[in-house]
Amino acid sequence: MNKTMVLVVEDDRSVQNLMISTLKAHDYRYLIAVNGESAILEASSHNPDIILLDLGLPDIDGVEVIERIRTWSNVPIIIISARSEDSDKIEALDAGADDYLTKPFSVEELLARLRVTERRLAMMQGEQASSPVFVNGKLRVDFSAGCAYLDEEELHLTPIEYKLLCLLSKNVGKVLTHTFITQNIWGHSWENDVASLRVFMATLRKKLEKNPDSIKYIQTHVGIGYRMIKVE
Ligand code: CA
């Protein structure tokens, strides 16, 4: 079986060492780039399965690296951000990144993000990618029929809730920003839209996660957006 190939883009030697030793210990293959230009070159010549990308690079901005890679590739990109503000993460996610880690992060956090991304990869490459039916744990969304079911029971969703559920399902495993979601649902992203989104997300959640011990399908990223979890 092919081992997952990870491209590590990081100029800070100590963080790079932490990532490499973690990847080695868990049987990943890896490549290293220490700036943006070489990251783009490595990505185009070696076709990695996942990219771990530091946003603060010595030559070009990490967001530009994402934009350029996205012109030809959908490879999952996990950004590594040193800044605690959300704005750079949001910008990177809107440019096409899939997920993020904030420095300092633990080995466990890094591994967890890699696992989430691998599950997303498996789904993108698997049968489900082009299937009209999305299955995740007890949740089933039939895109062609326009219905969603939980535990084989039809969910009674409003049109907006259904659109939200479809958008999250089609991007399972990926963090979607408020801007991305509101633009997809309403066609624009105004100040009020984020507040409305919060309300619709709460009602959708109530229907999906009926009991306190229900599976948590939707994760909130405070100040950033939402993600549907791929349930194992
Ligand atoms: Ca850096």
Image: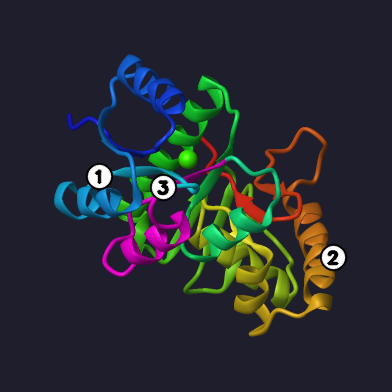
Most distant residue in the left direction: 45
Q: Residue at x 40, y 59 (%)?
A: 66
Q: Earlier in the sequence, mark 1 or mark 2?
A: 1
Q: Secondary structure at mark 2?
A: helix
Q: Which residues are magenta?
A: 58-81
Q: Residue at x 21, y 48 (%)?
A: 42
Q: Secondary structure at mark 3?
A: loop
Q: What is the number of the mark on residue 203?
A: none
In the picture of the structure, the residue carrying the numbered disc 1 is: 48
Query: Mark 2 is on which residue type?
Result: Val
Depth check: give the residue in front, 61 or 195: 61
Residue 53 seen by the camera: yes
- Mark 1 vs mark 3: give the one in front: 3
In the picture of the structure, the residue carrying the numbered disc 3 is: 58
Asked whether mark 1 and ligand 1 are closer than 8 Å, the reply comes as no
Name the image quarter holding residue 14.
top left
In the picture of the structure, the residue carrying the numbered disc 2 is: 199
